[in-house]
Image (spheres, helix red, strand yellow):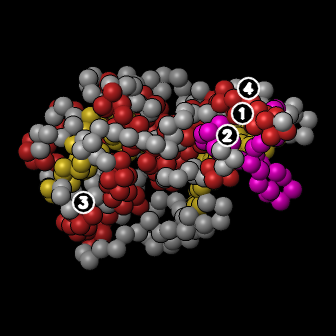
Amino acid sequence: METDRRDFLIQGAGALAGVALLPGLDTFARTIQDDYPVAIIGTGRQGRAVAAELQKLGARIVALCDNDAPRLRSGGRRVKDAKTYDDADKMLATEKSVEAVFICTPTHQHRALVDACIAAGKHIYCEAPLAHTVEDAKAIASAARGSSKVFQAGLLARSNPVYSLARSFYRTEAFLKLVSMRAQNSRKDSWRQAASTAERQARLDWRLHEATSTGLPGEWGTHQFDVFHWFSGKYPVRIHGNGAVRVWDDGRKVADTVNLALEFDQGECLEYQATLGNSFGGRYEVLHGVNSAFKLAWSHGWMFKEADAATQGWEVYANRQRFFNDEGITLIADATQLASQNKLKDGVGLPHDSLYYGVSDFLTSCQEGKAPKTGASEGFRATLVGIAAHRAVVEGGTIEISPDDLKEA
């Protein structure tokens, strides 16, 4: 009898969690049409990461393209059956069977490649930020809007099951009302690439050149700012920034350490810090609410409840972790299913990188004709905020963002 009662309570708790928490019971079992034909343009670090996730998902990588010969050879070794091209136009003209193209090149090269892929009638996954200038970002969004094919921006939070889970709490009593926001990205990395010639070095170090780089706020911040855009449904109205070359004094002009304050229309503020000089703390976002706070770290997430917040029934069975004097309720995707099997602890942390879920969602959109999780409009607005934040750092001042700035046309 006691066992039956306990099982009932667990199932009841799971049902509550299912209503309030779950992004869907198919979180870990992603399947796509076998041998779906795709191509990748850009076989650097990100292109190779995309290739690895596509192979996990069962897509068929028909072609790889890069105008850097060493990187193209490296990509070819990882995807042995793919044909390799050093020219995107030639690849698109030759590989007619390709349904979708992943654009993983340096940011400033995206616009021309998006135009070429749209003209060739392909679905497009374009890494974020969409472009290094507002003009190019607007052009990309406009072209995507005029296409009948799927266009997804590579902003991964919106596909991340843990982030979806946290967002399901955001407008409930569990969080109640936004108080403040904070985020950081700390990684000790010079952003310099190894190259045998000065010409190749210059090409590979595009993130360090003022003409082509959106700096830490654009290349990293864009992805994290979009977390707050998605949760709150808002975009900042002004950005204060400063930054400097604190560590890598090698002649670069692009700051390796930045500090930003992004202000929203009702006084909410996002404090953001990023550096290439130290790795402590890594990458995460924090949202403080009246009843709880979320800490989101891409593969993991936690909810920290206030002492005066009401207790919910499902919390009895929630997994917890201790952080100094605070106890965090671990945000676990598919909690209902795991709770019913007494395996909640097995679900701590995602089994795949965030990229896996973004790529999977894109392929599903292509095959089923669904709207993408992160379309061109969201990609444009996040890119604009990243560019404005970089400008605030470069100018060491304040950049205003008006509603008209956020319009694509």
Residue lying at the far right of the rendered structure: 308
Q: Nearer the viewer, residue 397 or 193?
A: 193
| Label 1: few (<14), some (14–19) or many (≥20) C-alpha neighbours in 10 Å | some
First reached walking from the N terminus: tag 2 or tag 1: 1
Residue lying at the far front of the rendered structure: 1
Residue kind at label 3, given as amino acid type: Val
Q: Secondary structure at mark 3?
A: loop
Measured in 3D between alpha carbons, the distance from the residue under mark 1 to the one under mark 3, in whole angstroms, is 45 Å
First reached walking from the N terminus: tag 4 or tag 3: 3
Q: Residue 79: which disc? A: 3
Q: Residue 11: which disc? A: 1
Range of residues picked out in magenta: 312-339
First reached walking from the N terminus: tag 3 or tag 2: 3
Residue kind at label 4, given as amino acid type: Thr
Residue under label 4: 172
Residue kind at label 2, given as amino acid type: Ser
